[in-house]
């Protein structure tokens, strides 16, 4: 556990609660590593199971990988979570293959891709309004070509990423990606 951490990060899968160990092992097998965030969440095996279940379900949703990565980075920035801004900057670059201009745009609540821009702006509106978006916000995302199912998925991605941001902020999770600080508002 780092000096700033508020909740212990198990140093190894074997140090996590027994019920969380197979879940963490599966993540390690799938991703090649187990990020500190998931090690922290593993303190509650039920929370880890729920988080991973929702995350995996959304991986098979209607939104493409790049749009999901853009939303994750925009939400992390909007919520001021350095762990998640760092993680999603890295993942956006090396997994989703977003370029520097799009990464910067996402941190500003936008995207360089016209359709994805509407999804990212809507996601940031959901964060800012805590779900109380306007009719105009919903019309704008639908006008960009997103159907009802995709609008719901955007909202659920906001919720999942906000959950992640809040866990990392409360726990003060040690950042295990190249550090990128959120922009002060």
Image (cartoon, helix red, strand yellow):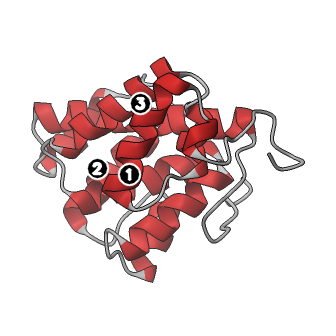
Residue drawn at 53 percent across, 60 percent down: 87
| Relative image position of residue 161 (x, y in whole percent) | 46, 40
Ranked by sequence position, the earlier of labels 1 and 3 is: 3
Q: Count residues near mark 3 (Cα–Cα under 10 Å), then give few for <14, some for 14-19, many for 20+.
A: some
Q: Quadrant of the N terminus?
A: top right
What residue is disc 3 on? 51
Q: CA distance from mark 3 to mark 2?
A: 22 Å
Label 1: element kind: helix
135 above or below 172?
A: above
Ranked by sequence position, the earlier of labels 1 and 2 is: 1
Q: Count residues near mark 2 (Cα–Cα under 10 Å), then give few for <14, some for 14-19, many for 20+.
A: many
61 above or below 33?
A: above
| Relative image position of residue 11 (x, y in whole percent) | 68, 48
What residue is disc 2 on? 119
Residue drawn at 43 percent across, 22 percent down: 132
Q: Nearer the viewer, mark 1 or mark 3?
A: 3
Query: Is 123 positioned to the left or the right of 81 in the image?
Result: left
Q: Nearer the viewer, residue 50 or 30?
A: 30
Is the residue under label 2 in contact with that under label 1 (CB below 8 Å)?
yes
Residue 159 falls in image quadrant: top left
Query: Is 56 positioned to the left or the right of 25 in the image?
Result: left
| Relative image position of residue 81 (x, y in whole percent) | 64, 48
Q: CA distance from mark 1 to mark 2?
A: 7 Å
Q: Which mark is residue 71?
A: 1
| Relative image position of residue 28 (x, y in whole percent) | 41, 53
Is the residue under label 3 in contact with that under label 1 (CB below 8 Å)?
no
Q: Nearer the viewer, residue 51 or 163?
A: 51
Ranked by sequence position, the earlier of labels 3 and 2 is: 3
Is the residue under label 2 in contact with that under label 3 (CB below 8 Å)?
no
């Amino acid at each position: 556990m780092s000096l700033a951490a508020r909740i212990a990060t198990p140093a190894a899968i074997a140090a996590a609660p027994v019920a969380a160990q197979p879940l963490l092992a599966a993540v390690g097998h799938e991703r090649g590593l187990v990020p500190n965030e998931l090690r922290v969440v593993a303190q509650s095996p039920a929370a880890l199971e729920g988080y991973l279940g929702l995350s995996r379900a959304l991986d098979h949703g209607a939104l493409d990988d790049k749009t999901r990565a853009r939303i994750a980075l925009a939400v992390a920035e909007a919520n001021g979570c350095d762990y998640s801004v760092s993680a999603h900057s890295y993942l956006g670059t090396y997994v989703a293959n977003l370029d520097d201009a799009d990464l910067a745009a996402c941190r500003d609540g936008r995207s360089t891709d016209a359709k994805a821009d509407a999804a990212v702006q809507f996601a940031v509106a959901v964060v800012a309004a805590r779900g109380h978006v306007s009719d105009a916000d919903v019309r704008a995302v639908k006008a960009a070509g997103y159907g009802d199912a995709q609008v719901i998925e955007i909202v659920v991605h906001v919720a999942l990423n906000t959950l992640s941001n809040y866990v990392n902020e409360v726990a003060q999770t040690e950042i295990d990606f190249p550090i990128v600080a959120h922009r002060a508002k």
